[in-house]
Image (spheres, helix red, strand yellow):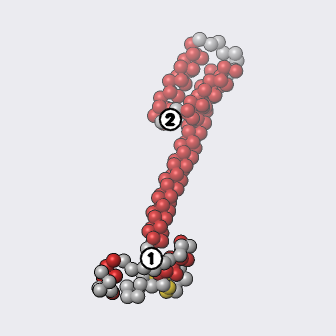
Amino acid sequence: MLHLGIDVLILVGMYIIVPTVRMQLTFAAIHTMALVTLHFNIKEPVYQMANVTVPLTLMLANFIGLGMSALFNRARHQVFAQYEAEKAIRLELERAHSDVRTLAELIPMCASCKKIRNDAGYWEQVETYMQAISGASVTHGLCPECVNMFYPDAG
């Protein structure tokens, strides 16, 4: 009887270990037929009902194994679907983060007076904005083109 219990555990465990349903059914059919054949041809039944209980036990083990396999596959598919959903959300979040980073790199500037609109919505001089953002002090000077434009005789 202990041998039958071990055979049942092997049969049920096979449904969990073997990956595809086709292979599960193939191995289970071969294993079950081999055990039934061994029982009827080699073993002497310990009690009269063994010829009925052994095949029924093996059939029950197959049904239990199929049920566990179905539950396991459904859980695996749910985990995979959840992983795919999380992956899509992660990609969307990365895309949104990239868009925010691009928008943060844009500085709204007046086309006429060159003032910059800060995060609070107020317009301020470029120098004030640069000092507030970077902490650097801004000094003033003239580039060579502006020197020539404003002071043509200085050249």
Mark 1, residue position? 107
Residue at image position (56%, 20%) is: 36
N-term-proximal mark, 2 vs 1: 2
Q: Nearer the viewer, mark 2 or mark 1?
A: 1
Above or below 44: residue 49: below
Residue 40: numbered disc: none
Residue 19: numbered disc: 2
Can the viewer see residue 149 in this picture?
no
Residue at image position (33%, 86%) is: 151
Observer-nearest residue: 147 or 64?
147
Residue at image position (54%, 73%) is: 136
Task: Report x, y in % for residue 17.
Answer: 55, 32
Can the viewer see residue 123 in this picture?
yes
Instruction: Classify mark 2: residues with Cα within 10 Å, few (<14), some (14-19) or many (20+).
Output: few
Observer-nearest residue: 135 or 1?
135
As helix, strand or loop, the secondary structure at mark 1 comes to loop
Q: CA distance from mark 2 to mark 1?
A: 56 Å
As helix, strand or loop, the secondary structure at mark 2 comes to loop
- Looking at the picture, which amino acid does disc 1 mark? Ile
Above or below 122: residue 51: above
Instruction: Classify mark 1: residues with Cα within 10 Å, few (<14), some (14-19) or many (20+).
Output: few
- Looking at the picture, which amino acid does disc 2 mark? Pro
Observer-nearest residue: 147 or 111?
147
Task: Report x, y in % for residue 155.
Answer: 30, 80
Residue at image position (53%, 75%) is: 137
